[in-house]
Image (cartoon, grey):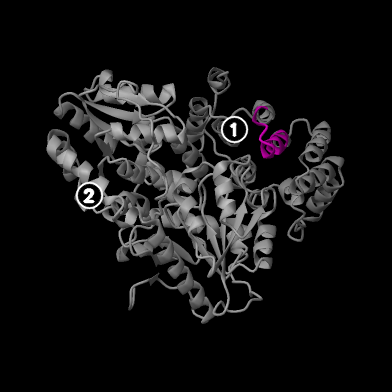
Amino acid sequence: MSVCPWFWRISKGIAARSATRSEVNRFLGIFFQTDRNLSKTVAHCSRGGSAEGRLSMNKPLRTKHLSKSARRKLEAEAQSPAVFLKAEAGQAFIEGDYQRARELTMQALVFEPENATLHAEIASSFMQEKKYELALKHLMGALKLEPTSPKWLSAIGTILFLMDKLGDAVGFFEAVYQLDPENAMNVSRLIQSQMNLCDWSVYEDQKNKLRILDNDPSNGDPFTTLLYVDDGAFQKKRVVMKTRKKATISEQKVARKFDRTPVADRKIRVGYFSCDFFNHATMFLMARHFELHNRDKFEIYIYDYSEEPDNVMRQRVLRSADCYRQIQGVKDEDVAELARADGLDIAIDLKGYTKHARPAIFGFRAAPVQISYLGYPGTTGMPTMDYFLADPVTVPKEGRRHFSEKILYMPNCYQVNDNSRAHPEEKPTRADMGLPEDAVVFCSFNNHNKVTPAEFDIWMDLLKDVDNSVLWFLAAADVVRANILKEAEARGVPADRIVFAGRCSTPDHVARLPLADIFLDTFACNAHTTASEMLWSGVPVVTKPGEQFAARVAASIVTAVGCPELIAETDEEYRALALRLATQPEERQALREKLKANIPTTPLYDTEQYVRDFEALMEKAIQRYDDGLKPDHLSLAEGKV
């Protein structure tokens, strides 16, 4: 049921006022870290400025600066049942006993029935259990008491976002944008929601939104801004500031001492950390990688915090590992301690800041050498993350300044691929997919939230310039499809020139890819897995590299498959290249034949050589540590990198 009509009724009389930063911090700790671990939530909450916030964190109140009467008043309040109950509830929350936290908070409400924060804290306990409907109900209670409060409005928007009610969420975030326009966390959620809807009004005041995010770089989702703007310095500033404000990370800046022997006469112990050990894009790339590790030189440990049931892909990874650890539900600090007890030499984070990531594990130092790899296309900004694995195309020398890590340079593309995968035996026809049989099919199978007006303008021009052409666009939700059709119509392109593709199983998805003629890449965040899948299916990928890593991935991929001619340096070159391929069927067919010949002979799908190169870099990184040297940019080439 939509809550938007209700919202507009209760918000009709909203007055423009701002919540204090301490109030916002306390509440955002509850509601904006819900897919993260508890330690980070507590760290965020502890910055709140209210007395009950400090008590709930068991921190003593400083009273020396107060007058005698003020001290007596504070001491009297501290003896009240409500304060005691709130402190006990806070402790129960920290310990993960959410049922008890709720019961104590409900008792406190008897003494303070007008305390909106207590309603919010009940909601936060339900959020930890992913009981979003109940959390929403109690947040409404807080909003009823304080109907013009930006922090409650923003929190309701966040719950609706997590419930995938994005249209309703946008209404709440937009209201907060008017009431508390400098609230960076709210702006980040607004941007994320609108991009997920292909609601491109998000770009109308992009400069102002970026200013707000830049002024408060520690708040907001890093991955959202990767899609929103191609600016490596901006992305680095945000994640560096974000990690500095996380107590669980910043307190661990000094590397721990490890009780270990050098690796010269033993196997190197490598641990991979992720929740994606199932039928996920990362595993479709990496499964063969695990199988090809040299077991005479390396011991492989898997640290899995997925809630997914057992599956074929996980079993494939398990057969390739020496040790499997299920760490779902284990605290970050305890995971790091477990990894140290396992004697890891190298800890590899496959998540970064993607969904359900747990970067705090690496803030606690899981291993002497820690590496960010594959999952997140940008710097982590963490002082304890030593290396980032890339290649000369994705991170040229001038791009290193956008990373807090040192770069491990693979000689070819950084992206691993599985050369053991089979081409589908059964392939659909264009008619099966609703595509015209004789049309030129431009394809956009990136996630739709990567698409911006900058690319779309060019795509619509191509449809107008190429008779009998269509754009095959991946979008499942009706609201996204409606927004794309609206944008096409605004550019003079009728609806019948857009053919939508829905979500389907991975085998069915891969089977339909060869039906496209030309894949059109997005700019700020390129195709990654999709680009290599398209090339593997024989479809040329037209791409334009940008500045940040995420905007250079497809250029690296097409280079590794021996087709650098698919790289355009400007918008004009991108359009001209796509237009030429669309209007020159002989050239297009020659490219398809070249791709078919290059897949088995070029580095992109040479998984065996990739793993050997990867292992050689791991050896160099841990040997450098054993030699007492700090991390530095490393490659397999001789001489200075």
Q: Is residue 189 above or below residue 57?
A: above
- x, y percent for residue 246: 59, 56
Main secondary structure along the magenta-highlighted residues: helix
Q: Amino acid at mark 1?
A: Ile
Task: Give the quarter of the image for residue 482.
Answer: top left
The magenta stretch spans residue 223: no
Which quadrant is home to the N terminus? Answer: top right
- Toward the bottom, the furthest residue is 627
Q: Is residue 289 above or below residue 578?
A: below
Judge the density around disc 2: few (<14), some (14-19), many (≥20) Cα neighbours within 10 Å: many
Q: Is residue 300 above or below residue 444?
A: below
Q: Which mark is residue 159?
A: 1
Q: Is residue 522 left or right of residue 255?
A: left
The magenta stretch spans residue 126: yes
Q: 149 and 502: which one is in front? A: 502
Q: Is residue 473 left or right of residue 597?
A: right
Q: Provide the residue designation for mark 2.
A: 567
- x, y percent for residue 283: 49, 47
- x, y percent for residue 401: 37, 64
Q: Amino acid at mark 2?
A: Ile
Q: 308 and 9: which one is in front? A: 308
Q: Residue at x 40, y 47 (%)?
A: 226
Magenta region:
119-133
